[in-house]
């Protein structure tokens, strides 16, 4: 597709369960970002992938959060043993790393996670 | 660390009128990028306009323009001829030029268009 896609659109889970959120970036974009949008914290950076380099995980809030990017394209954000404070919208973005507008991030529609 | 401040949690404007949303930021870098994103109820963050700090000329995209004051670290968004479809949350964001290119966002301004 032309834009960043994310799945699922909405996810309801029970406290203590693991969840996986998927992001499919724009074709050809080598940089991929995850952000979290919550009522109390606003928009927070979580993790950044750039090509084959080691990801920048400096924004991950705890070791329950992890992410991987397979084949330099699709990324999965995993939250283990979910807590109610993990309830938020998880946004994925991608960008080019060369050429014009390389600094501009394009966002997906997000996954709304509700932990009961 | 960079910070972005949006001091107007909510704004409203009559349809067809002009509105200005404020944004200030703090950074020690000399080169960086600034963005305005729009987030309608659909949740999709949509790029409205971008500004490169080394360019003195203010960016313009159709009805949207910015007033970039580098010395004052101010980056306001002007929406002319407001339309009902402009109703959304608007986020100001900062991105440095080097190292981690993550975006730092402000807290957002909710814009209501009055018919």
Image (tube, coloured by chain):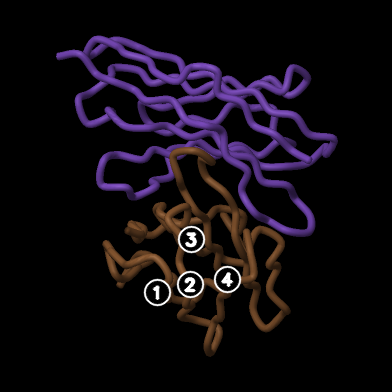
Q: Between tags 4 and 3, which lies in front?
A: 4
Query: Element under label 3?
Result: strand
Q: Earlier in the sequence, mark 2 or mark 3?
A: 2
At 27% from the left edge and 28% from the top edge, which residue is drawn?
B87
Q: Earlier in the sequence, mark 1 or mark 3?
A: 1
Q: Nearer the viewer, residue B79 or B113?
A: B113
Q: Chain of mark 1?
A: A
Q: Which residue is mark 4?
A: A64
Does the image show residue A98?
A: no
Q: Nearer the viewer, residue A87 or A53?
A: A87
At 30% from the left edge and 73% from the top edge, which residue is drawn?
A1
Q: Which chain is purple?
A: B
Query: Element under label 4?
Result: loop
Residue A93's tag is 3
Q: Which residue is mark 1?
A: A17
Rendered-image quadrant of the C terminus of chain B: top left
| In the rendered image, the vertical position of residue A55 relative to residue B17, given as above or below | below
């Amino acid at each position: 597709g032309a834009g960043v896609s994310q799945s699922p659109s909405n996810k309801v889970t029970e406290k203590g369960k693991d969840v996986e959120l998927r992001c499919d970036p724009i074709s050809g974009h080598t940089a991929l970002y995850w952000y979290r949008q919550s009522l109390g914290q606003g928009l927070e950076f979580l993790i950044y992938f750039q090509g084959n380099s080691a990801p920048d995980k400096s924004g991950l809030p705890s070791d329950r959060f992890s992410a991987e990017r397979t084949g330099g394209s699709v990324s999965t954000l995993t939250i283990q043993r979910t807590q109610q404070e993990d309830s938020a919208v998880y946004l994925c973005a991608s960008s080019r790393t060369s050429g014009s507008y390389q600094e501009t991030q394009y966002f997906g529609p997000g996954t709304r996670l509700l932990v009961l | 660390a960079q910070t972005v401040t949006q001091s107007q949690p909510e704004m409203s404007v009559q349809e067809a009128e002009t509105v200005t949303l404020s944004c200030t930021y703090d950074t020690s870098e000399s080169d960086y990028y600034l963005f305005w994103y729009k987030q309608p109820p659909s949740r999709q963050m949509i790029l409205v306009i971008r500004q490169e700090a080394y360019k003195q000329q203010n960016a313009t995209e159709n009805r949207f323009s910015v007033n970039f004051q580098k010395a004052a670290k101010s980056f306001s968004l002007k929406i002319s001829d407001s339309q009902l479809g402009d109703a959304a949350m608007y986020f100001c964001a900062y991105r440095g030029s080097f190292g981690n290119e993550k975006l730092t966002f402000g807290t957002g301004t909710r814009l209501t268009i009055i018919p």
